[in-house]
Image (cartoon, helix red, strand yellow):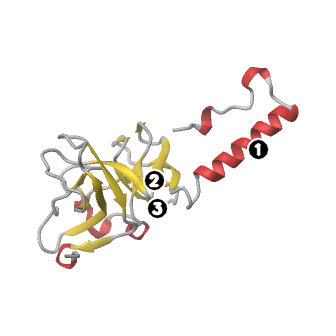
Amino acid sequence: MFNLQSFATQKSGVSDGNIANALNKIRQLLTKLLHSPETGVIYLTNVDPITTVSFGSIVCPYTDPYSCVAAYADDGPAQPIVSRGFAVCLSDEVAPSEGGYFRFNGEADVHLENDLTPVAGELVYVSKTAYGLGTNVIPGDLNDWVRVVGTIKDASEYSSPSNVFVRMILGKCCESQNLPA
C-alpha cells in the first residue's frame, strides 16, 4: 500500500517553490482519498500496550476515534466502542503506540484461527481464543458475547493458519442466543 509518510516534499532537494507546493497538494488529495468513507480505509493508532497487530488482524476502534485494539470475543460488553464495528489491518505490522492502515468496510483478507474448515457464505466471528483473529465457529456458549465481522467470500486459499477473503459487515454485534440463522 502507498505510504503517505514517505512521500516527502524534499525529494531531489526541493523544499519550496511550485514543485514543493504541487507535491503538498498531491499529498493532501491522496490523504483525503485514502482516509474517507468511500474507500473504507482509515489510519488508526494501536493503543494496546502489548499486542502488535499484523496484516489481516481484526481490530476494534477504541475511545479515541483514531485508535484501536486487537478484537477479542471474550471482552463482552466491556470492549470499547462496539457500535463502531470492526476494521481489518492492511499494514504489515502495527506495533503498540504506532499507526497503520485499516479497512472498515468493503472486502479484506482476514486472519483466521488454525484448524478450521471455512466455506464461502459462512459468517466470520471475532475469536475467543486469540486476539485479532477470526473464526467460522461460534465462539462461546449461551449468554457469551458473539461479534460477527463479515461473511466469507472465498475460502480456497485457506491453509492452517492463513487468510480468508471476507466481505465485511459493519457494526454487527449480538449475543449468541440472538444470532441470525
Ranked by sequence position, the earlier of labels 3 and 1 is: 1
The residue at 19%/76% (across/down) is: 181
Crowding around mark 3 (Cα neighbors within 10 Å: few <14, some 14 to 19, many 20+) is few
Q: Earlier in the sequence, mark 3 or mark 2?
A: 3
Instruction: Give the image location of residue 103, x and y in percent.
Output: 45, 53
Q: Is residue 62 left or right of residue 140?
A: right
Q: Is residue 30 above or below residue 151?
A: above
Residue at image x 69%, y 31%? 8
Q: Camera-side residue: 41 or 100? A: 41
Q: Which residue is mark 1?
A: 25
Separation of marks 3 and 1 at Cα, in angstroms? 31 Å
Residue at image mark 3: 63
Amino acid under disc 2: Arg
> Which secondary structure lies at badge 1?
helix
Name the secondary structure under disc 2: strand
Image position of 178 with respect to 139: above or below: below
72, 165: nearer the viewer: 165
